[in-house]
Amino acid sequence: MKFTKYFEFTKLRPDRVDIREEWIAEAFYRPIFEEVQNDGRIK
């Protein structure tokens, strides 16, 4: 997967180091819920 520089930096924080990239990919490709915001962004 391709990540932003901000995301790469943030995932190095002590409270985030245990989050695996496989988990991120699973959530991205198979979301449980998805909502489109007023400005068109998906959350």
Image: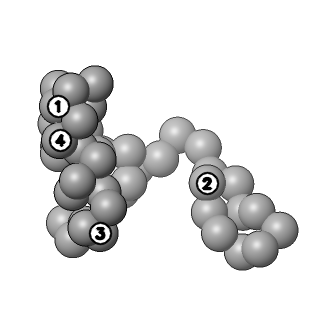
Q: Which sits in the foreground, 43 or 18?
A: 18
Q: Which residue is mark 2?
A: 43
Image point 28% across, 24% down: which residue?
15
| Residue at the limit of the structure toward the bottom, as seen here | 40
Circles 4 and 1: CB atoms closer than 8 Å: yes
Mark 4 Cα-neighbour bin, 10 Å: few <14, some 14–19, many ≥20: few
Cα separation, mark 2 vs mark 3, equals 17 Å
User: Distance from label 1 to label 2 (Cα)?
Assistant: 22 Å
Q: Which mark is residue 36?
A: none
> At numbered mark 4, what does the secondary structure look like: helix, strand or loop?
loop
Disc nearest the viewer among 2 and 3: 3
**In the rendering, which numbered label is found on residue 17?**
1
Q: Earlier in the sequence, mark 4 or mark 3?
A: 3
Residue annotated with mark 3: 4
Residue 19 visible in the picture: no
Considering only order in the chain, which callout, 1 or 3, is on the residue closer to the N terminus? Answer: 3
Q: Is residue 16 visible?
A: yes
Whichever of labels 1 and 2 marks the residue nearer the N terminus, that label is: 1
Q: Which mark, by number, is residue 12?
A: 4
Q: What's the amino acid at mark 4? A: Leu
